[in-house]
Image: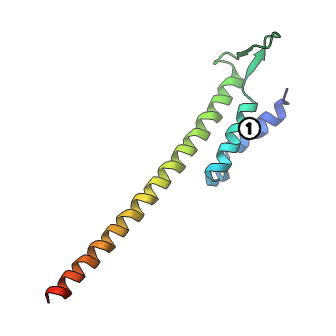
Amino acid sequence: MTKLKDVYNFQCKVFEPETSELSVKELKVMLKQLYEYFPYTDKGDGNKQPYDTDNDYSKKWFKCYDHLLNILSMKKQEFRYKLSLSLSIVAIVISVIGVAVRITVSG
């Protein structure tokens, strides 16, 4: 089992401002690391039982999970925005070129 010190250090890292600057790939790696700290108890027969959601450790885990998912979602939205902006700029340039060609051909 992981030491609580490691878990708390990881939780602090999740909420550092630098984390929001990580790439999608790096964020997914952090998410996989977070899964290693999932709050559960081993029933002894190979079955796991999650901690109660009102448990302090569980609350912290789910806050970290939500935070990482929100950052990933924002990164995806940022990519879509940049793609949409690029396509819009290309469309405007093509339209301007088309108008310029019509003006020179008819003039």
Using the image as rendered, state which of residue 81 and residue 51 is in the foreground.
81
Decide: is 105 above or below 35.
below
Q: Quadrant of residue 61?
A: top right
Check disc 1: other Cα within 10 Å, few if <14, some if 14-19, many if 20+: few
Image location (x, y in percent) of residue 95: 27, 72
Kindly identify the residue that appears in the image at 69 percent across and 19 percent down.
55
With 21 as the anchor, is 13 left or right in this view?
right
Image x and y of residue 18, in percent: 67, 53
Residue that extends furthest to the front in the rendered view of this protein: 105
**Picture coordinates of residue 65 (x, y %)?**
63, 34
Across and down, in percent, residue 96 comes to 27, 76
Residue at screen point 57% across, 45% down:
71
Q: Nearer the viewer, residue 16 or 35?
A: 35
Seen as rendered, the residue at the extreme left is 106
Q: On the rendered structure, is 105 left or right of 95?
A: left
Q: Is residue 52 above or below residue 61?
A: above
Q: Which residue position holds label 1?
A: 33
What is the quadrant of the N terminus in the image?
top right
Pick whichever, 45 or 63, lies toward us: 45
Q: Tell me the element at label 1.
A: helix
Count the marks: how many? 1
Task: Give the image's coloring scheme.
Answer: rainbow
* Mark 1: amino acid: Gln
Residue occupying image coordinates x 42% and y 64%? 86
Report the side of 34 relative to 102 (left or right). Answer: right
Residue 97 in the figure: left or right of residue 34: left
Q: Which residue occupies 71% across, 32% down?
A: 35
Residue extending furthest toward the bottom: 107
- Dividing the image into 4 quarters, which one contains the C terminus? bottom left
